[in-house]
Amino acid sequence: MTIEEILKADIQKAIQKHFEIDIEEIILQPTKKEFEGFYTFVTFTLTRTVRKAPAEIGQVIGTELVESSAVVDGFNVVQGFLNISLKDQTWLDLFETINNHPDYGTMPSNGQSVMVEFSSPNTNKPLHLGHLRNNFLGDSLSRILKASGYNIVKTCLVNDRGIHICKSMLAYRELGNGETPESSGIKGDHLAGKYYVMFDQEYKKQIKELVVQGMKEEEAAKKAPWILEAQRLLLLWEQGDADTIALWQKMNSWVYQGFGETYNKIGVNFDKTYYESDTYLLGKDIIEEGLQKGVFYRKEDNSVWINLTEEGLDEKLVLRGDGTSVYITQDLGTTELKNKDFHNDRYLWVVGNEQDYHFKVLFAILKRLGRIYSEGCYHISYGMVDLPSGKMKSREGTVVDADDLIAEMIQTAADRTQELGKIDDFDSAEAKQLYNQLAMGALKYFLLKVDPKKRMLFNPLESIDFQGHTGPFIQYTYARIRSIIRKAEQASIQAVIPGDNYKLHQAERELIFSLSQYPSKVNAAASEFAPSLISQYAFELAKVYNQFYAEVSIFSDPNPEATRFRVALSQVVSETIRKALGLMGIEVPERM
């Protein structure tokens, strides 16, 4: 049993003994910092049944716990809050348990599998800042769920077809003059993005010319030569025209190579990649099945619809009158394909909150169709990322490319580190690795520390602060601890858990308590799909360690038992920080 389980059982016994009532569930919470204690039991809920004041109830339970509990050392009551302190031996036993389990915080397999689909880039532009939040969320969720005992399948659906892809193709065909990534020195995905922007520039120019000639702007937007040609290109692609397919394949190959380089930089990979060009026709059989079941209905223009007003949604088109698919059609087919391929217990889609309604419709339709797997479908919705300069727009070329941002972050990490002057003995390879670790740690931590549902403002300079609520602050704490452990090894000081008579310092108790919270934080992050809970935990643990480091002496304490124990404590903290940051895909430097 865990300490929490023992405490809950002891509180139940105390309530039964003194008030003769049974409580189904005892809820404990961490004691607020301003009060003495580590666990708090709220007594307000018992007042109506027991007919006593909350403070009196707390006094009775606390007194009983001190007398009869094997783990409780003391208590204090603040109104209806019973704050409980534990015996030193309880803390030492707990630390020994943590220390003896290298996989502490990692749960055994629960036999269930989860598919996490994320990234989902378009092949007409490079990955940008918004994609980074998506990738980091998907990757971190995959790591957290795996640590919680799930088997994980990471998938990506690449949007590699459609009118937006044809826009880049058209601009390149007309203006490219045979330019390639090799001839231009431009990364393949950036090159495709360049022509997407050029299309938009020429398209706007053509609209303006038609308006000058007397055409209304709305009509001009539909009749501009390049938009008509892009639509023709899409039709040719769907018909399998050889020249169009060849151009599409050539430009996509450039983009995939570019994506691969970026994914490698950010430490993200996938178990399976789906391509919209392979899946966009899927789903039509499901529509036919739904018609036969009466789930869908056909209108006079031959289009197929579903009425979801009972679910609080709307009527939704699922197939056009000419028989062509809409997005929901192909998503129904792709989801069916994914389930056929992997038979997962849960399916997660990491997609921005502008698609909230779309996923409500998708899941409602799957449920109406009787798909059992619909119960395990979840949309991990997240808010957009803004910059101090405002919102990003791909077609206008005002996005922050992921590669450019990463390069800027690495340079900033180098500048900040060199200012501190602490790596003068690093060779160039070590320094380069450190700058990259700090840059990616800053970037990932900043984008993951905010609740996914919230829209956020990304400030690159703030993210790499070595003193704030940042990745580099936690990485620096880890490096400091590793330095302490190396010093202990050089002095042949062994990490040892002290004997029964050891009197703990309050800072040591705080540290053990913080370590003890790690498994519950992992489970909470998994159940709530919230990497931000792990980021907050890592930050709090680093703060508690730094407080411990400030309050106690590790190597100068006259008691050698204290030194050995504090080295042991430091080792476990460093390992827990490494694990926690690892769940966010963040590497830790051995020295800084």
Image (cartoon, helix red, strand yellow):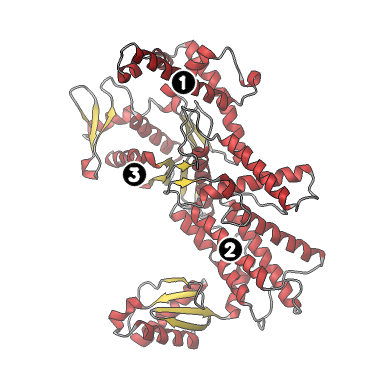
Give the camera-side residue of 441 and 137. Answer: 441
Circle 3 sits in a helix, a strand or a loop, which is it?
helix
Q: CA distance from mark 2 to mark 1?
A: 51 Å
| Left or right, residue 366 beside residue 499 | left
Which residue is tagged 1? 201
Q: Image quarter for residue 574?
A: bottom right
Question: Which residue is painted at 46% across and 22% down in the image?
Answer: 165
Count of picture labels: 3
- Contact between marks 2 and 1 (CB within 8 A): the answer is no
Give the camera-side residue of 580 and 298. Answer: 580
In terms of sequence position, does the residue under pointer 2 or pointer 1 come before the other?
1
Give the camera-side residue of 17 and 316. Answer: 316
Q: Nearer the viewer, mark 2 or mark 1?
A: 1
Residue 105 in the image: state x and y as whole percent.
Answer: 56, 60
| Left or right, residue 531 beside residue 238 | right
Circle 2 sits in a helix, a strand or a loop, which is it?
helix
For this orientation, the residue located farthest to the front is: 212
Which residue is tagged 3? 372
Type of amino acid at the residue the image marks with label 3? Ile
Within 10 Å of disc 2 (Cα), the crowding (few <14, some 14-19, many 20+) is many
Residue 37 in the image: state x and y as whole percent.
Answer: 51, 77
Residue 25 in the image: state x and y as whole percent.
Answer: 37, 72
Does residue 483 sit above or below 512 in this rendering?
A: above
Q: CA distance from mark 3 to mark 1?
A: 48 Å
The label shown at residue 541 is 2
In terms of sequence position, does the residue under pointer 3 or pointer 1 come before the other?
1
Type of amino acid at the residue the image marks with label 2? Leu
| Left or right, residue 150 beside residue 332 | right
For this orientation, the residue located farthest to the left is: 300
